[in-house]
Image (tube, grey):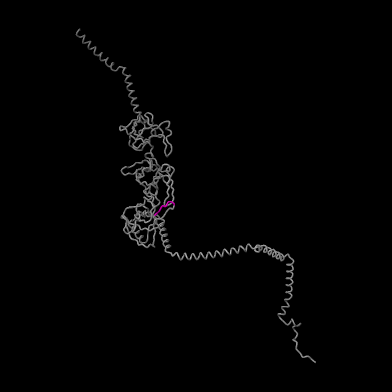
Amino acid sequence: MSEDTPRHDAASDTPHRARTTPQARFSPIWIVPIVALLIGAWLVYDNYRSRGPQITLTIGNAEGIEAGSTLIKTRNVEVGRVEQVHLSEDLSTAVISARMSPGNDAMLVEDSQFWVVKPRVGREGISGLNTVLSGAYIQLQPGESDIESRDFEVSDQPPVAPAGAAGLRINLTSQLGNSLRVGDPVTYQGYTVGRVEEANFDATTRRMQHRVFIEAPYASLVTDSTRFWSATGIDLRLDSEGFRVNVESFEALLGGGVTFGVPEDLPLGGTVEPDTTFNLYADEDSARQGTFNRYLEFVLLVDDSVRGLTKGAPVEFRGVRVGTVAAVPWKFTADQPTERGGFAIPVLIRIEPQRLGIENREVDIDEWRNRYERFFELGLRATLKSGNLLTGALFVDLNFHRDLDDDYAPMTFAEQRVFPTTSGGFALIESQITSLLAKLNDLEVEPLLEGLDRNLDASQTMLEEVRALSASLRELVDDPGTREVPTNLNETLEGLRSTLEGLSPESSAYQELVGATQRLERLMRDLQPVARKLSDNPRALLFDSLEAEDPVPRAPRD
């Protein structure tokens, strides 16, 4: 029994230990930390899920940006906040770490735009005054790309046009270094239709590169015939073509800009593709000049002064512009043609057939050159004339001179064909005056002077006679009898007036004269039968009866 007892105790102890071990492992005391751990994990997960995406912004100057305070807004709605601001590794830029609000992931695409909104004073007015008290903030303009991004660059200036805006973006290239800046207006006939988005200088080509945005629906105004030129606000010119003033829009007047149009001699042209490159000209005249890309070049050898003739002056044929002065002077030190006897000033001109309205057809330069050669033989010559008496500006006038004595002979100057010239303007007047003085010098003056002396003597004699006659008239006028002539004349007139008054119808003399006239008239009527009878038979004056026989003479009776 004693040996079985221990085994019984061991067997009985084993089930007891098996029942007490699970109760110690799953003690209720562990429920509290497990629940706390699960709640903490849920809070961490919920906080992570409720946080928006983090983005990195790069900006050149972090002025006005404060960590924890500066907001990111879209349409004045908060969509994020700046968490941290620090410098980049190379210390060239500032790096901003910002946290976006949940649900804004769709706005973070590669063409989204960020810029700083703060108080600004520019040509377009004052903007950002609401940030004076609240502080600057970062504006987000969502893009339209499908590619997500978390790294962006922040501009210090607002964009000219939002990404995806309807319109046309083109490129302008020019040598005008300070002509355009970002934000300058693009105008068409004085109306703003776009803005300059970018302005960069290309050191390799030494030209300015501009990117311009034309808003819809004005993008259709840009065609392959369009020319762009700088708008300086007020363009004041006084040249050989007269006084001209051109005023652009008020905004262009303050800050400049660019304007465009189609020259009147060109067709409207067709539409252009985005990113098409155009030349930016200095002014409208230069833009119009750029359309005449087919021309003939000639050299004028001018014997007169070229003072007042400048580059760009017109070349006209009877008032119609056919070309442009290209250089004054041109290759001044080149050898003069041996055919000429003196030294002349070389002037390079361009004859532009496209100015005559044939720009839509292909210009045959060789055919035009042969045509001008025939014109030279017919007397076509170039002359410098004054276009503006106030400024003294000159232009080149082309005309036919068929009365010239010299024959045309082709010449070249510096491997360029010479356009024949003739003197004109003040030089022509000077030569005419010189010729007149030469003719006057050849006149025989002594006979003229002798004749003039004789004429002067005769004139002196006549003057003396006139002086004597004047003295006689003065004596006649001073004579008392002459002075009484008006009085006597007045008395005579008074007597004549009295006489005429006596012959008036109311006077007695007039009445007597009328009565005598009436009696005479009656007498004449009474004498008419007697006169008629005597006219018929004159014997009635001697005989009583006309029917008696004629008496017969008889001898007396004793």
Q: Quadrant of residue 197?
A: top left
Q: Residue placed farthest to the right in the image?
A: 558
Q: Quadrant of residue 234?
A: top left
Residue ID at (43%, 38%): 125
Residue ID at (37%, 56%): 303
- Along the line of sight, the residue nearer the viewer: 422 or 193: 422
- Residue 352 vertical placement versus 67 (above, below): below
Asked whether residue 394 is drawn in magenta, I would say yes
Q: Residue placed farthest to the bottom in the image?
A: 558
- Residue 60 vertical placement versus 235 (above, below): above
Q: Is residue 544 left or right of residue 371?
A: right
- Residue 504 vertical placement versus 23 (above, below): below
Q: Is residue 442 left or right of residue 506?
A: left
**Image quarter (top left, top right, bottom left or bottom right) of the N terminus:** top left
**Image quarter (top left, top right, bottom left or bottom right) of the C terminus:** bottom right
Quick check: can you spot residue 434?
Answer: yes
Residue ID at (72%, 81%): 538
- Residue 19 vertical placement versus 184 (above, below): above
Residue range corresponding to the magenta coloring: 390-395
- Along the line of sight, the residue nearer the viewer: 191 or 497: 497
- Residue 258: where, in percent of width, then height? 39, 44
Asked whether residue 498 is drawn in magenta, I would say no
Residue ID at (42%, 38%): 122
- Residue 4: where, in percent of width, then height? 20, 9
Q: Quadrant of residue 80?
A: top left
- Residue 154: where, in percent of width, then height? 36, 35
Q: Is residue 16 left or right of residue 57?
A: left
Quick check: can you spot residue 55?
Answer: no
